[in-house]
Image (cartoon, rainbow, N blue to C red):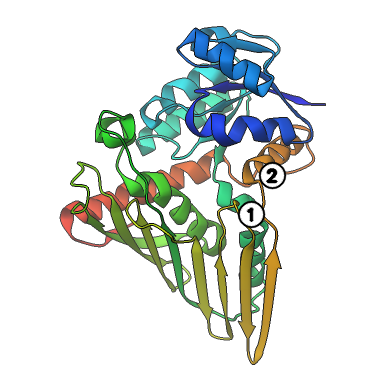
Amino acid sequence: MATRWGVIGASGVANRRAMPAINLAEGNELQALMVRDLDRAKKLADEHHAKSYYNSIEAILSDPDVDAVYIATPVYLHCEHVIQSAEHGKHILCEKPMAMSIEECKRMIDACKANNVQLQICFLLRFHPCFQEVKNIISNGEIGEIVETRVSLLKAYEIEEGKWRREPTQSGGGVLMDMGAHGIDLISYILGDTSEIAMMAGFHIKNWEIEETATVLMKMKNGSNAVIDVSFVVPHSETTIEVYGTKGTIIAYNGQGYQEYYLKICIDNNIREEHKPSENLYKNLFVHYNRCLEGEDEPIAYGFAGLNNINLINSAYKSLATKNFIAI
Protein backbone atom coordinates (compact mmCIF):
# COMPACT_ATOMS: atom_id res chain seq x y z
CA MET A 1 0.00 0.00 0.00
CA ALA A 2 1.37 3.41 -0.96
CA THR A 3 2.26 5.94 1.73
CA ARG A 4 0.55 9.24 0.91
CA TRP A 5 2.79 12.11 1.96
CA GLY A 6 2.07 15.66 3.02
CA VAL A 7 5.02 18.05 2.96
CA ILE A 8 5.11 20.78 5.61
CA GLY A 9 7.50 23.53 4.58
CA ALA A 10 7.62 22.77 0.87
CA SER A 11 10.33 25.29 -0.08
CA GLY A 12 14.11 24.86 0.07
CA VAL A 13 15.34 21.29 0.35
CA ALA A 14 11.80 19.92 0.15
CA ASN A 15 11.34 21.58 -3.23
CA ARG A 16 14.77 20.69 -4.57
CA ARG A 17 15.15 17.14 -3.34
CA ALA A 18 12.46 15.61 -1.13
CA MET A 19 9.34 16.09 -3.24
CA PRO A 20 11.02 14.88 -6.46
CA ALA A 21 12.24 11.86 -4.48
CA ILE A 22 8.75 11.03 -3.20
CA ASN A 23 7.53 10.90 -6.79
CA LEU A 24 10.38 8.52 -7.68
CA ALA A 25 10.17 6.29 -4.60
CA GLU A 26 8.29 3.02 -5.01
CA GLY A 27 5.40 2.75 -2.57
CA ASN A 28 5.08 6.51 -2.02
CA GLU A 29 2.84 9.30 -3.34
CA LEU A 30 2.93 13.08 -2.94
CA GLN A 31 -0.58 13.78 -1.70
CA ALA A 32 -0.31 17.36 -0.41
CA LEU A 33 2.06 20.19 0.41
CA MET A 34 1.97 23.30 2.56
CA VAL A 35 3.69 26.69 2.43
CA ARG A 36 2.41 29.94 3.92
CA ASP A 37 1.91 31.65 0.52
CA LEU A 38 -1.12 30.02 -1.14
CA ASP A 39 -0.13 31.10 -4.65
CA ARG A 40 3.30 29.56 -4.18
CA ALA A 41 1.68 26.44 -2.75
CA LYS A 42 -0.40 26.06 -5.92
CA LYS A 43 2.66 26.60 -8.11
CA LEU A 44 4.67 23.97 -6.22
CA ALA A 45 1.75 21.54 -6.30
CA ASP A 46 1.54 21.91 -10.07
CA GLU A 47 5.30 21.41 -10.46
CA HIS A 48 5.44 18.31 -8.27
CA HIS A 49 2.02 16.83 -9.11
CA ALA A 50 0.67 17.07 -5.56
CA LYS A 51 -3.06 16.42 -5.38
CA SER A 52 -3.74 19.13 -2.76
CA TYR A 53 -2.06 22.25 -1.44
CA TYR A 54 -2.51 24.35 1.69
CA ASN A 55 -1.15 27.42 3.46
CA SER A 56 -1.68 26.32 7.07
CA ILE A 57 -0.50 23.45 9.25
CA GLU A 58 -3.99 22.73 10.53
CA ALA A 59 -5.36 22.39 7.01
CA ILE A 60 -2.80 19.87 5.76
CA LEU A 61 -2.98 17.85 8.99
CA SER A 62 -6.78 17.71 8.65
CA ASP A 63 -6.51 16.11 5.20
CA PRO A 64 -7.71 12.51 5.69
CA ASP A 65 -5.79 11.38 2.60
CA VAL A 66 -2.41 12.27 4.15
CA ASP A 67 -0.87 9.25 5.89
CA ALA A 68 2.52 10.73 6.80
CA VAL A 69 4.18 14.14 6.83
CA TYR A 70 7.69 15.23 5.95
CA ILE A 71 8.56 18.26 8.10
CA ALA A 72 11.08 20.65 6.56
CA THR A 73 10.31 23.83 8.48
CA PRO A 74 13.00 25.80 10.39
CA VAL A 75 14.52 23.95 13.33
CA TYR A 76 12.85 26.05 16.01
CA LEU A 77 9.44 24.92 14.70
CA HIS A 78 10.18 21.18 14.53
CA CYS A 79 8.96 20.35 18.03
CA GLU A 80 5.66 22.18 17.62
CA HIS A 81 5.00 20.73 14.18
CA VAL A 82 5.92 17.15 15.11
CA ILE A 83 3.64 17.21 18.16
CA GLN A 84 0.76 18.68 16.12
CA SER A 85 1.27 16.03 13.43
CA ALA A 86 1.34 13.21 15.97
CA GLU A 87 -1.86 14.45 17.58
CA HIS A 88 -3.51 14.28 14.15
CA GLY A 89 -2.39 10.66 13.77
CA LYS A 90 0.19 11.28 11.05
CA HIS A 91 3.43 9.33 10.76
CA ILE A 92 6.41 11.69 10.66
CA LEU A 93 9.73 12.15 8.90
CA CYS A 94 11.44 15.19 10.45
CA GLU A 95 14.39 16.97 8.87
CA LYS A 96 17.60 17.11 10.82
CA PRO A 97 18.55 18.49 13.24
CA MET A 98 15.62 17.08 15.17
CA ALA A 99 15.04 20.07 17.46
CA MET A 100 16.67 22.84 19.48
CA SER A 101 17.15 20.88 22.72
CA ILE A 102 17.04 17.45 24.34
CA GLU A 103 13.87 18.49 26.14
CA GLU A 104 12.13 19.21 22.83
CA CYS A 105 13.30 15.88 21.42
CA LYS A 106 11.83 14.05 24.40
CA ARG A 107 8.49 15.82 23.98
CA MET A 108 8.43 14.86 20.29
CA ILE A 109 9.22 11.21 21.01
CA ASP A 110 6.63 11.06 23.79
CA ALA A 111 3.92 12.59 21.56
CA CYS A 112 4.59 10.05 18.82
CA LYS A 113 4.49 7.15 21.28
CA ALA A 114 1.26 8.43 22.84
CA ASN A 115 -0.41 8.65 19.44
CA ASN A 116 1.07 5.41 18.06
CA VAL A 117 2.75 7.05 15.07
CA GLN A 118 6.21 6.47 13.68
CA LEU A 119 8.92 9.13 13.99
CA GLN A 120 12.05 9.01 11.86
CA ILE A 121 14.74 11.66 11.38
CA CYS A 122 16.22 12.62 8.02
CA PHE A 123 19.78 11.36 8.53
CA LEU A 124 20.51 10.84 4.84
CA LEU A 125 24.04 9.45 5.09
CA ARG A 126 22.67 6.32 6.77
CA PHE A 127 20.97 5.57 3.45
CA HIS A 128 24.09 5.74 1.28
CA PRO A 129 25.36 2.27 0.28
CA CYS A 130 28.90 3.59 0.67
CA PHE A 131 28.50 4.27 4.38
CA GLN A 132 26.39 1.16 4.91
CA GLU A 133 29.30 -0.84 3.53
CA VAL A 134 31.75 1.04 5.75
CA LYS A 135 29.59 0.19 8.78
CA ASN A 136 29.46 -3.48 7.81
CA ILE A 137 33.23 -3.70 7.30
CA ILE A 138 33.79 -2.20 10.76
CA SER A 139 31.13 -4.38 12.41
CA ASN A 140 32.63 -7.51 10.86
CA GLY A 141 36.05 -6.67 12.30
CA GLU A 142 37.72 -6.67 8.88
CA ILE A 143 39.99 -3.73 9.70
CA GLY A 144 40.56 -4.79 13.30
CA GLU A 145 40.08 -2.52 16.29
CA ILE A 146 39.26 1.06 15.32
CA VAL A 147 41.99 3.58 16.12
CA GLU A 148 40.74 6.83 14.56
CA THR A 149 38.01 8.09 12.23
CA ARG A 150 37.89 11.37 10.32
CA VAL A 151 34.87 12.93 8.59
CA SER A 152 35.09 16.03 6.39
CA LEU A 153 31.99 17.92 5.20
CA LEU A 154 33.16 21.17 3.65
CA LYS A 155 31.37 23.46 1.20
CA ALA A 156 30.87 27.12 0.27
CA TYR A 157 27.37 28.12 1.36
CA GLU A 158 26.06 31.67 1.50
CA ILE A 159 23.26 32.50 3.94
CA GLU A 160 21.51 35.79 3.33
CA GLU A 161 21.12 38.24 6.19
CA GLY A 162 17.71 37.94 7.81
CA LYS A 163 17.33 34.24 7.03
CA TRP A 164 16.51 31.95 9.95
CA ARG A 165 19.73 29.97 9.52
CA ARG A 166 21.72 33.10 10.49
CA GLU A 167 19.72 33.56 13.71
CA PRO A 168 20.90 31.33 16.59
CA THR A 169 17.55 31.52 18.39
CA GLN A 170 15.89 29.97 15.33
CA SER A 171 18.64 27.71 13.95
CA GLY A 172 20.19 26.58 17.23
CA GLY A 173 23.67 27.27 15.83
CA GLY A 174 25.69 27.42 12.64
CA VAL A 175 27.47 24.85 10.53
CA LEU A 176 27.57 22.31 13.37
CA MET A 177 23.75 22.26 13.63
CA ASP A 178 23.52 22.10 9.84
CA MET A 179 26.16 19.91 8.19
CA GLY A 180 27.67 18.85 11.49
CA ALA A 181 24.45 17.05 12.41
CA HIS A 182 25.12 14.69 9.48
CA GLY A 183 28.78 14.23 10.44
CA ILE A 184 28.05 13.48 14.09
CA ASP A 185 25.24 11.11 13.15
CA LEU A 186 27.50 9.28 10.71
CA ILE A 187 30.05 8.71 13.46
CA SER A 188 27.30 7.47 15.79
CA TYR A 189 25.94 5.20 13.06
CA ILE A 190 29.22 3.47 12.23
CA LEU A 191 31.02 3.58 15.60
CA GLY A 192 28.37 3.65 18.32
CA ASP A 193 28.29 5.72 21.49
CA THR A 194 30.46 8.68 22.48
CA SER A 195 31.99 9.17 25.93
CA GLU A 196 33.46 12.70 25.55
CA ILE A 197 33.22 15.55 23.06
CA ALA A 198 34.98 18.87 22.40
CA MET A 199 34.68 21.61 19.79
CA MET A 200 36.60 24.46 18.20
CA ALA A 201 34.91 26.95 15.85
CA GLY A 202 35.69 29.75 13.39
CA PHE A 203 33.75 32.99 12.92
CA HIS A 204 36.40 35.07 11.16
CA ILE A 205 35.57 34.78 7.43
CA LYS A 206 31.93 35.89 7.26
CA ASN A 207 31.75 37.39 10.76
CA TRP A 208 28.29 35.91 11.25
CA GLU A 209 26.81 35.41 14.71
CA ILE A 210 26.77 31.67 13.99
CA GLU A 211 29.93 29.61 13.49
CA GLU A 212 30.96 29.11 9.86
CA THR A 213 33.58 26.42 10.53
CA ALA A 214 33.83 23.79 13.25
CA THR A 215 36.09 20.95 14.31
CA VAL A 216 34.66 18.38 16.70
CA LEU A 217 36.75 15.87 18.65
CA MET A 218 35.01 12.76 19.96
CA LYS A 219 36.24 10.02 22.27
CA MET A 220 34.20 6.93 21.47
CA LYS A 221 33.17 4.31 24.01
CA ASN A 222 35.08 1.72 21.97
CA GLY A 223 38.25 3.66 22.88
CA SER A 224 38.88 5.19 19.45
CA ASN A 225 39.06 8.87 18.51
CA ALA A 226 36.95 10.66 15.90
CA VAL A 227 37.42 14.05 14.25
CA ILE A 228 34.74 15.92 12.28
CA ASP A 229 35.48 19.00 10.16
CA VAL A 230 32.58 21.05 8.78
CA SER A 231 32.52 24.41 7.04
CA PHE A 232 30.31 26.85 5.13
CA VAL A 233 33.29 28.68 3.57
CA VAL A 234 35.36 26.04 1.72
CA PRO A 235 34.62 25.55 -2.00
CA HIS A 236 35.60 22.63 -4.25
CA SER A 237 35.61 19.99 -1.54
CA GLU A 238 34.00 16.58 -1.11
CA THR A 239 32.46 14.52 1.62
CA THR A 240 35.26 12.31 2.95
CA ILE A 241 35.47 9.65 5.61
CA GLU A 242 38.63 7.86 6.71
CA VAL A 243 38.58 4.97 9.17
CA TYR A 244 41.88 3.63 10.50
CA GLY A 245 42.03 0.24 12.22
CA THR A 246 44.72 -2.10 13.51
CA LYS A 247 44.38 -4.34 10.43
CA GLY A 248 43.43 -1.90 7.71
CA THR A 249 42.02 1.39 6.45
CA ILE A 250 38.85 2.54 4.71
CA ILE A 251 38.75 5.76 2.70
CA ALA A 252 35.51 6.95 1.08
CA TYR A 253 34.62 10.22 -0.62
CA ASN A 254 31.96 11.81 -2.82
CA GLY A 255 29.41 10.47 -0.39
CA GLN A 256 26.74 13.17 -0.66
CA GLY A 257 24.63 11.30 -3.16
CA TYR A 258 25.06 13.79 -5.99
CA GLN A 259 27.78 11.88 -7.84
CA GLU A 260 29.49 8.51 -7.87
CA TYR A 261 31.56 7.65 -4.85
CA TYR A 262 34.98 6.11 -4.47
CA LEU A 263 35.76 3.53 -1.81
CA LYS A 264 39.26 2.29 -1.06
CA ILE A 265 39.67 -0.60 1.39
CA CYS A 266 43.16 -1.61 2.49
CA ILE A 267 43.33 -4.76 4.63
CA ASP A 268 46.73 -6.23 5.42
CA ASN A 269 48.51 -6.06 2.04
CA ASN A 270 45.35 -6.23 -0.06
CA ILE A 271 43.81 -3.12 -1.63
CA ARG A 272 40.26 -3.14 -2.98
CA GLU A 273 38.85 -0.16 -4.87
CA GLU A 274 35.22 0.40 -5.80
CA HIS A 275 33.48 3.04 -7.89
CA LYS A 276 29.70 3.13 -7.67
CA PRO A 277 27.03 5.37 -9.25
CA SER A 278 25.30 8.24 -7.51
CA GLU A 279 22.43 7.55 -5.15
CA ASN A 280 19.24 9.53 -4.55
CA LEU A 281 19.38 9.37 -0.77
CA TYR A 282 15.95 10.92 -0.26
CA LYS A 283 14.47 8.27 -2.54
CA ASN A 284 16.23 5.56 -0.54
CA LEU A 285 14.87 7.07 2.67
CA PHE A 286 11.24 7.26 1.48
CA VAL A 287 11.35 3.69 0.17
CA HIS A 288 12.70 2.59 3.56
CA TYR A 289 10.00 4.53 5.43
CA ASN A 290 7.23 2.87 3.42
CA ARG A 291 8.76 -0.55 4.11
CA CYS A 292 8.80 0.27 7.83
CA LEU A 293 5.12 1.21 7.78
CA GLU A 294 4.36 -2.03 5.95
CA GLY A 295 6.24 -4.02 8.61
CA GLU A 296 8.93 -5.10 6.13
CA ASP A 297 11.82 -3.22 7.75
CA GLU A 298 12.93 -1.62 11.03
CA PRO A 299 13.74 2.12 11.21
CA ILE A 300 17.44 2.94 11.05
CA ALA A 301 17.02 6.68 11.76
CA TYR A 302 14.49 6.68 14.58
CA GLY A 303 13.60 9.43 17.05
CA PHE A 304 16.14 8.44 19.70
CA ALA A 305 18.92 8.80 17.10
CA GLY A 306 17.81 12.42 16.70
CA LEU A 307 17.82 12.97 20.45
CA ASN A 308 21.32 11.49 20.75
CA ASN A 309 22.44 13.76 17.91
CA ILE A 310 21.15 16.89 19.65
CA ASN A 311 22.73 15.81 22.93
CA LEU A 312 26.12 15.53 21.22
CA ILE A 313 25.71 18.83 19.33
CA ASN A 314 24.65 20.79 22.41
CA SER A 315 27.47 19.20 24.41
CA ALA A 316 29.89 20.32 21.69
CA TYR A 317 28.59 23.89 21.98
CA LYS A 318 29.02 23.65 25.76
CA SER A 319 32.63 22.61 25.16
CA LEU A 320 33.14 25.63 22.90
CA ALA A 321 31.83 27.93 25.64
CA THR A 322 33.79 26.34 28.50
CA LYS A 323 36.91 25.27 26.57
CA ASN A 324 36.68 21.80 28.13
CA PHE A 325 35.87 18.27 27.04
CA ILE A 326 32.28 17.43 27.97
CA ALA A 327 31.35 13.98 29.27
CA ILE A 328 28.34 12.40 27.57
The quarter holding residue 162 reads top left
Relative horizontal placement of residue 33, taking residue 319 as reference (left or right): right
**Closer to us: 295 or 29:** 29
Whole-percent x and y of residue 293?
73, 32
Whether residue 32 can be seen here: no
The quarter holding residue 224 reads bottom left
Residue sitting at x 62%, y 68%: 262
Q: Mark 1 points at which residue?
A: 128
Q: In which quarter of the image is the C terminus?
A: bottom left
Q: Residues within 10 Å of mark 1 (few under 14, many from 20)?
A: many
Residue sitting at x 67%, y 64%: 133
Relative horizontal placement of residue 170, taking residue 17 as reference (left or right): left
Q: In which quarter of the image is the N terminus?
A: top right
Using the numbered discs, state the Cα–Cα distance from disc 1 to disc 2 in whole angstroms.
Answer: 8 Å
Q: As displayed, is residue 140 above or below residue 313? A: below
**Count of marks placed on residues:** 2
Dot 2 lies on which element? Answer: helix
**Closer to us: 56 or 144:** 56
Q: Name the residue under label 2.
A: 284
Q: As displayed, is residue 143 above or below residue 291? A: below
Residue sitting at x 65%, y 23%: 48
Whole-percent x and y of residue 42?
58, 11
**Contact (CB < 8 A) between labels 1 and 2?**
yes
Kind of residue at badge 1 = His
